[in-house]
Image: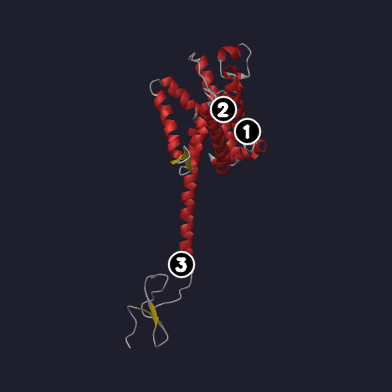
């Protein structure tokens, strides 16, 4: 997979957008604020297949930003602020881990997979979906938590919580909410396929590469230590301070080194 991604990156890297997730977060903020003042605004953005057929084609792209906003108060403002900061952090973390091109690919896959899920369910199963853009944000959270499981957030400003716990709870709630309906589970699987088929394989390849690198470094260090000349070599048995690092060596009156087991008695 890395070979294919390397080939794609050489051809299309010039089209990559640094900080793409940051820009998406800013758009989320704009839509959130507009929806807070005009709740009907999100409905003009969300995926609605009959309206798309009627000419509202922009819904094919804007559905990813449609969000459900409750009451507009200090709590929602606080949630918006910290949510945006998290998205900025996820953007920087993933670009540092994957690079700009692979991060862009992950995001585009997430958008297209969610669009395909919406079209499939609208055309084949005649089932509408609502506010499905949340799956893109969830897949970004899952990807960041996969690579940085020990990163700790302070919930309520004083409760430390590793990011993997938050991702696991979010994913668990999604799965539990879809277990009663095979179609809902299928919809969920398609929407987060960017995480299942991009983030996880890249993480597995990264883990294998890191393990093999560690083995090579350990082997190299061992070979280097073997090539180092011994400072003490027993004149009697040939043991030295490299082959027997725990042994004690002394210089006898005859000027030769001996290990403690073969040191001549005076």
Mark in front: 1 vs 2: 1
Report the number of discs. Answer: 3
Toward which corner of the image does residue 29 lie, by quadrant? top right
Q: Looking at this rendering, what residue extends furthest in the front direction?
A: 74
**Contact between labelled residues 2 and 1, with CB atoms less than 8 Å apart:** no
Label 3 residue SS: helix
Quarter of the image with the C terminus is bottom left
Comparing 11 with 74, the one in front is 74
Which residue carries the number 1 mark?
23
Residue density around tag 1, few if under 14, some if 14–19, many if 20 or more, within 10 Å: some
Query: What label does residue 111 carry, if any?
Result: 2
Q: Is residue 107 left or right of residue 253?
A: right
Label 2, label 3: how far apart the Cα atoms are:
54 Å
Label 3, label 1: how far apart the Cα atoms are:
54 Å
Q: Of label 2 and label 3, which has the lower sequence position?
A: 2
Which residue carries the number 3 mark?
226
């Amino acid at each position: 997979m890395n070979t294919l991604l390397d080939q794609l990156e050489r051809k299309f890297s010039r089209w990559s957008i640094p900080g793409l997730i940051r820009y998406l977060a800013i758009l989320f903020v704009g839509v959130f604020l507009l929806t807070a003042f005009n709740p009907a605004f999100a409905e003009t953005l969300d995926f609605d297949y009959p309206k798309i057929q009627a000419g509202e084609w922009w819904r094919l792209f804007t559905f990813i930003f449609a969000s459900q906003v409750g009451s507009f108060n200090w709590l929602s403002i606080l949630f918006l602020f910290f949510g945006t900061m998290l998205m900025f952090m996820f953007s920087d973390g993933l670009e540092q881990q994957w690079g700009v091109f692979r991060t862009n690919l992950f995001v585009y896959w997430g958008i297209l997979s969610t669009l395909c899920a919406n079209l499939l369910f609208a055309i084949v199963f005649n089932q509408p979906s609502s506010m499905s853009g949340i799956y893109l944000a969830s897949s970004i959270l899952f990807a960041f938590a996969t690579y940085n499981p020990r990163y700790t957030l302070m919930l309520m400003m004083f409760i430390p919580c590793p990011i993997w716990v938050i991702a696991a709870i979010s994913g668990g709630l999604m799965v539990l909410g879809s277990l009663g309906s095979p179609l809902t589970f299928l919809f969920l699987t398609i929407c987060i396929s960017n995480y299942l088929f991009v983030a996880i394989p890249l993480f597995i390849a990264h883990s294998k590469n890191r393990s093999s690198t560690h083995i090579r470094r350990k082997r190299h260090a061992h070979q280097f230590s073997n090539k180092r000349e011994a400072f003490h070599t027993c004149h009697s048995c040939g043991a030295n301070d490299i082959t027997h690092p725990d042994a004690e060596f002394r210089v006898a009156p005859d000027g030769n080194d001996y290990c403690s087991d073969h040191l001549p008695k005076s």
